[in-house]
Amino acid sequence: MEAARAVIRHLGVAGYTDVVASNMGTRDALWSGINEVLELSVRSDPEGPIISYTGEGLDIFAVAEALTERGWFVARGNEPRLIHLRILTAVHVPIFETFLDDLRAVVAEVRARRTAKDSDTVTYWG
């Protein structure tokens, strides 16, 4: 709570509101971009800065592994198997399009029969 107050004092209410709006715009763009990939679907309409998505007929853990190899941190969830993007922040605003480009490329790799090397590792239980 103290951290939120410090940020509001530093940015002002309008500045803080702008940051939140920008973060939510990034979340919405990620949600749309992920859902545009045929095999992927976001698990629900995200209300906050967190997105989880699954892959139909796709080794979603292979997708996570390939994203990690490209420098992205994504968590793996179980039951159902999914990728969990943790809290989106202002850091993600300028890079989300690059993430979506990499995601599309990775899905194409997995579609071409890539499978996860470590298929049982789960990093998130929710």
Image (cartoon, rainbow, N blue to C red):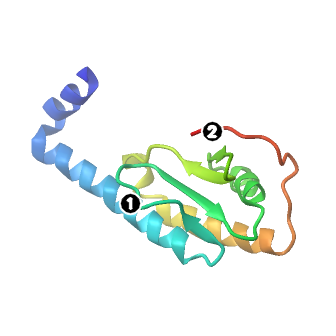
Q: Which residue is farthest front? A: 79
Name the residue furthest top. Answer: 2
Q: Would residue 8 be found to the left or right of residue 60 on screen? A: left
Left or right: residue 8 compared with residue 116:
left
Looking at the rendered structure, the kind of residue marked 1 is Thr
Rendered-image quadrant of the C terminus: top right
Q: Residue at x 78, y 57 (%)?
A: 62
Q: Residue at x 22, y 32 (%)?
A: 7
Q: Give the x, y percent position of residue 91.
A: 42, 47
Query: Which one is nearer the viewer's eye here, 41 or 103?
Result: 41
Mark identifier at residue 80 = none
Residue 124 bears which disc, if any? 2
Can you say whether 43 is above or below 77 in the image?
A: below
Secondary element at tag 1: helix
Quarter residue 36 falls in: bottom right
Quadrant of the drawing holding the N terminus: top left
Pointer 1 or 2: first along the chain: 1
Q: Residue at x 79, y 74 (%)?
A: 111
The residue pinned by badge 1 equals 26
Element at label 2: loop
Contact, CB < 8 Å: mark 1 with mark 2? no
Q: Nearer the viewer, mark 1 or mark 2?
A: 2
Measured as percent of width and height from the top left, residue 115 is found at: 86, 60
Residue 86 x %, y %: 51, 44
Amino acid type of the residue tagged 2 in the rendering? Tyr
**Residue density around tag 2, few if under 14, some if 14–19, many if 20 or more, within 10 Å:** some
